[in-house]
Amino acid sequence: MSEIKLKPCPFCGCDDRRVGIRKMGNKGYRVVCGRCGASGPYVSILSVGGSKMEAQDKAKVDWNRREKA
C-alpha cells in the first residue's frame, strides 16, 4: 500500500484525516475533501495500465500538486 501523504484541502484547510480517496464507480479515483467537497482530478484506472493502486497513487499526486504563486 502506498504511503503518499495527502496535503490539506486547498480551499477549506481540512487536514489529512478528512481528505480521502474516493472510488468513482469501477473506472477510476479522485481525492475528495470530506468537509467542503472539493475534488482533485479524476484518474481513470485504464489510463495507468489497469492498476487500481496506481490510479489511487496518481490521484493523490495530482491532488498534492499546487500552482506556485
Image (cartoon, helix red, strand yellow):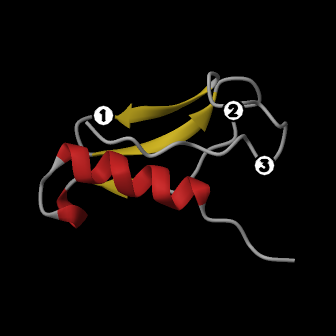
Amino acid tagged 2: Gly
Q: Nearer the viewer, mark 3 or mark 1?
A: 3
**Crowd band around label 2 with a 10 angstrom C-alpha radius: few (<14), some (14–19), many (20+):** few
Query: Which dot marks residue 10?
Result: 3
Towards the viewer: 13 or 26? 13
In the rendered image, which quarter is residue 34 located in?
A: top right
Amino acid tagged 1: Gly
- Give me the residue at 29% from left, 52% from top: 55
What residue sits right under mark 2 in the picture? 37
Can you say whether 17 is above or below 50 in the image? above
- Give me the residue at 85% from left, 37% from top: 12
Element marked by disc 1 = loop
Mark 1 or mark 2, earlier in chain: 1
In the image: residue 59, left or right of residue 15: left
Determine the residue located farthest toward the bottom in the rendered image.
69
Mark 2 or mark 3, earlier in chain: 3
Element marked by disc 2 = loop
- Give me the residue at 45% from left, 34% from top: 21
What residue sits right under mark 1 in the picture? 25
Mark 3 or mark 1, earlier in chain: 3
Q: Nearer the viewer, mark 1 or mark 2?
A: 2
- Give me the residue at 44% from left, 32% from top: 22
In the rendered image, which quarter is residue 15 located in?
A: top right
Image quarter where the C terminus lies is bottom right
Amino acid tagged 3: Pro
In the rendered image, which quarter is residue 1 located in?
A: top left
Please indicate, yes or no, whether residue 59 appears anywhere in the rendered image. yes
